[in-house]
Amino acid sequence: MPKSHAGSATDRLERIDVVTDSALAHLEIERLLEELLDRIRELLAADTATVLLLDSSGQHLVTRASSGMKEAVRQGARVRISGSRFAGRIATTREPLILDRVDETTVANPLLWHRGIRSLLGVPLIANDEFLGVLHVGTVGDRRFTDTDVDFLRVAADRVAMATRNRITDSGRAAALSLQRTLIPGLLPEVAGLDMAARYAPGEAGGVSGDWYDVFKLPSGWLCVTVGDVVGRGLDAATVMTRLRTAVRSYALDSADPAEVLTKLDRHVRHFEPQMMATVSYAMWEPSLCRMHLSLAGHLTPVMAPDNAPAELPEIPIDPPVGAGLVPRPRRTTAVDVEPGTAVLFYTDGLVERRNRPLDDGLALLRDVVRSGPTEALCSDVMLRMVGTDPTDDDIALLAIRREPDAAAPELTLTLEAVPESLADMRAALRRWLPTVGATDDDIDDLLVIIGEAGANVIEHAYGPGGGRFELRLTATEAQVEGTVRDQGNWRSARGTNRGRGTQLMQQLSDELRIEHDNGGTTVYLRRSLGNR
């Protein structure tokens, strides 16, 4: 390493333009910094050149790259920005600093004096008024850094900061987009009696936000729907969004009250994400689909559109966002009847808020646009009318759910996974269908037992660890229901003693019951009279 100055300051400032040359454009952030530091170190005739970047907490500087002292990177050297020593002072004052004595009283990182560094010159890394970190160079000889060296390093730091910010922004945007694509459901669950569709559209501001929607079923047969928006943009907001989405799912398993779920979520945010805030709409649909239970945490009210009637915004109290202000009063849950044919539209504020339009006007327009009908067409119409070619700064999440009109369909066909959770879905579908074909409460109770036992037998006996599917097919006439429960597995005998009582019960409650096994699987044939048996 040459110890003499590499030409005049003007020459060196011209040569530092290599930090923006096209040869470095393809490099990842760490490799880019290494290349830049090698060149800066050579041009300043220094022994070390190091970059420390602000971590996600905003409280520490972490060594990300070094030329001449790579062990600082391998050891994850970090410095508090509030400290009174070298890097901390630069971070606090955002001014260059020269040290002619390097020891435990002047620098926080012991690697520097163990390496024999005797003088240091450091400058802040700032891009677009945003503090990113510190760039410093060091020497082991008696050389003292000059004002010319400071000027040169400041110019170099400007180039390094801009290149770093661009790489961080690009990589953060890519990571956030990848994270959001992973967590926004690609397919919505299939629920007999419901039609669902969704849209997610990024805003023109670039990057991603914390908008999300989620739909999932509980073992009890209830359907849960959540739409939320974390305040902020970028990777931090997207990361918090993923944690909140997971937390909602976890809390939903233990609570049948949306207000209780959001209360737990609020405590989660206050404890684990104290700098963040989010609005959330959380609804739970009863298995009958006739009613949903809804709690709003600072989120806009969903639009409801009955069949062949104007849309409306139901009167639902809105509690504070999760993580906002003081601990709120008890959150509230509202039960809302959902008549057959009614569409419910959940959305984030990017759909209705515009800089040049009051929020109430946006909500009024949305109310005029929403009409009940197939949800794919509904989502397309809403996005066409509300967004069109007018760009929005904010992201938009949109979820439409329609309870299909009841019809006395003479047939019911379900294809289900052979897992215990499917039994709740099957029971919910039967409770919706059987009343439409004239079944009494007693009929429904008996058929739920008969068909439930048949499904449970498939789950226990038909398939091995690889799993499989089974099909329920029922037909109703004026006086009876008959049909089949069919699998394609290889039937395995029941284990243990005192088994087979379920089959006995099925026979007692049926007018006719047959179980047939063949090479293609097992079929349960059943027939049950309706009304007075």
Image (cartoon, grey):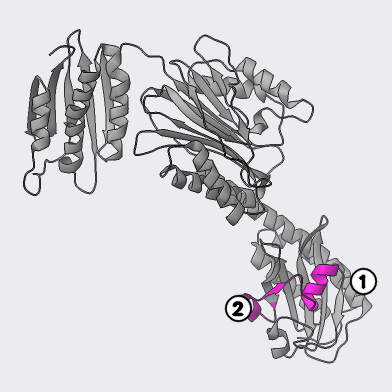
Gap in angstroms between the C-alphas marked 1 and 2: 36 Å
Considering the numbered disc 2 on the image, is that residue within a helix, a strand or a loop? loop
Question: Is residue 130 placed above or below 190 in the rendered structure?
Answer: below
Q: Which quadrant holds the C terminus?
A: top left
Q: Which quadrant holds the N terminus?
A: bottom right
Closer to the chain start, of discs 1 and 2, is 1
Residue 73 inside the magenta-drawn segment: yes
At horizontal 90% and vertical 71% (from top left) the residue drawn is 151
Identify the amino acid type marked 2.
Answer: Gln
Tally the marks: 2
Q: Which residues are magenta?
A: 67-94
**Left or right side of 84 for 295:** left
Q: Position of residue 271 (x, y in %)?
A: 59, 55
Question: Is residue 117 placed above or below 468 in the rendered structure?
Answer: below
Residue of label 2: 75
Residue of label 1: 10
Contact, CB < 8 Å: mark 1 with mark 2? no
Residue 462 inside the magenta-drawn segment: no
Q: Position of residue 443 (x, y in %)?
A: 20, 19
At horizontal 49% and vertical 12% (from top left) the residue drawn is 307
